[in-house]
Image: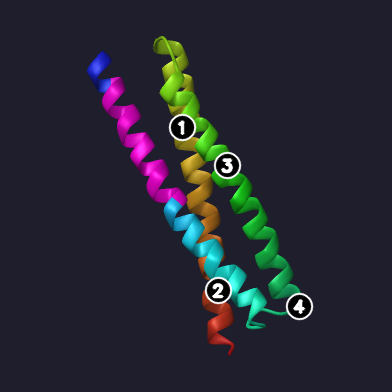
Amino acid sequence: MMFSKDQEAGQAAAAAKGAIKKATGTNEEAEEAISSGAATGADAKKLAQHVGEQKAGIEATKAAVGALAGAKGKDAKEKALTEVNKQVGLLNGHTKDIQHQLNKIKKNQ
């Protein structure tokens, strides 16, 4: 049982690392769309809001991974693992939303 939880924790940490990397790249692309003028008006405002939320999500995900790494005991590890998985899901959702917005902006150019 212990090995399984450790393995789950490792997989969750790896998933978080991948989600953070993807989110960071998507944020950079969105910020470029805003600064270059490709995204204007309501689109730029919406993108900027998503990027802000995404940056907060990246920090929350990093904190959750840190809590998971430091968790002692079965209950603490399970709670931390649940939080990492939740944050990864939120991060992936924001990334998908930002990418969808960027694709709409590119289509309209």
The stretch in magenta equals 5-20
Nearest to N terminus: mark 1 or mark 2: 1
Side of 30 where 17 appears, left or right: left
Q: Which residue is mark 1?
A: 65
How crowded pointer 4 is (Cα within 10 Å; few <14, some 14-19, many 20+) is rated as: few
Whether 105 is drawn above or below 76: the answer is below
Magenta-span inclusion, residue 18: yes
- Image point (61%, 69%), residue name: 31
Nearest to N terminus: mark 3 or mark 2: 3
Query: Dots 3 and 4: beta carbons under 8 Å?
Result: no
Q: Position of residue 106 (x, y in %)?
A: 54, 83
Disc 1 to disc 2, C-alpha distance: 29 Å
Q: Nearer the viewer, mark 1 or mark 2?
A: 1
**Secondary structure of residue under mark 3:** helix
Q: Which residue is mark 2?
A: 102
Nearest to N terminus: mark 3 or mark 1: 3
Disc 3 to disc 2, C-alpha distance: 23 Å
Q: Position of residue 13 (x, y in %)?
A: 38, 36
Q: Residue furthest right?
A: 41
